[in-house]
Amino acid sequence: MSRVLCWFSCGAASAVAAKLAVEKYGDRCEVLYCDTLKYEHLDNPRFMADVSRWIGRPIKLLKSSKYADIFDVFDKTGWLVGPQGARCTQELKRQVRREYQQDGDVQVFGLTADEQHRIGRFEKENPSVTCEWILRDSNITKADCYALLQKAGIDLPAMYKLGYNNNNCIGCVKGQAGYWNKIRVDFPEAFARMAQQERKMNVAINKTYAGDGLRKRVFLDELDPAAGRDVKAPDIECGVLCLAGDSGYEEDTEAVNASL
């Protein structure tokens, strides 16, 4: 009998997906988390423990055998983010999933009924993966996931309460100016840490087209505090099914470290 792998991401949707998968498949279902807790909000272990009790199943943590954390990835690869997405996501999420999965596994991901575009892209780019879209098939939206957790008495992760759309590492390289200016206010130490990393690597996450319309990189330590404040908060969920295009990062060779 095939394994059922449900990928938890410390987000609301993946928590509800795990609940449904465990109810449907029982002991066949493994609930798995690719560990990036070191640079996530300190509330995330609380949320994970609450979800584990709710689903009646331990959540198994998987770690990269090659990299210790996101900054280890940045330092060793010389890469932050580019047209192919975030290197930390590739190494600590997607690669870890690929190493754990086996032929015949049924994989459950936390994409909802209002994310059919992402589901379609994932299926197109991963034809060998057998997926069950348990939230979509139950017509459950992101808003429904928040409501179901609250009904179960589980507080939403702190990052949601602070106004972020997703529960990623604090200071996600897929974010742009408005996001980073919010991080600057809410988590100044995380902002300063990434600004230092940018200068060390000589790579900028943000960009501007001001003046002549050509792309120019903007380092965090020179980012206008008002930039991007009128832009809707981006949906930059990080997980094993994160797609390069989800970050909104534009196809531009200057986005990639010049050393690559």
Image (spheres, grey):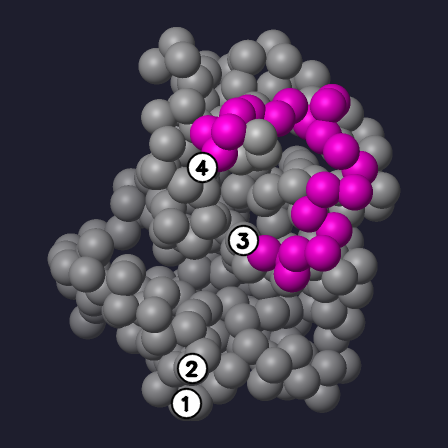
Between the residue at mark 2 and the residue at mark 4, the CA separation in whole angstroms equals 25 Å
Look at mark 3 in the image and give the residue it sits on. 236
Q: Nearer the viewer, mark 2 or mark 1?
A: 2
Q: The residue tagged with tag 2: helix, strand or loop?
A: loop
Q: Which residues are magenta?
A: 212-234
Residue for point 73% across, 23% down:
222
Residue for point 47% across, 48% down:
247
In the image, residue 231 lies in the stretch drawn in magenta: yes
Look at mark 1 in the image and give the residue it sits on. 138
- Sooner in the amino-acid sequence: mark 4 or mark 1: 4
Q: Main secondary structure of the magenta part?
A: loop
Q: Residues within 10 Å of mark 3 (few under 14, many from 20)?
A: many
Q: Amino acid at mark 3?
A: Ile
- Above or below, comparing residue 99 to residue 214 in the picture: below
Look at mark 2 in the image and give the residue it sits on. 113
Relative depth, front residue between 209 and 226 = 209
Residue for point 51% across, 67% down:
14
Q: Position of residue 240 (x, y in %)?
A: 40, 51
Look at mark 4 in the image and give the residue it sits on. 86
Q: Position of residue 248 (x, y in %)?
A: 46, 49
Between the residue at mark 1 and the residue at mark 3, the CA separation in whole angstroms equals 24 Å
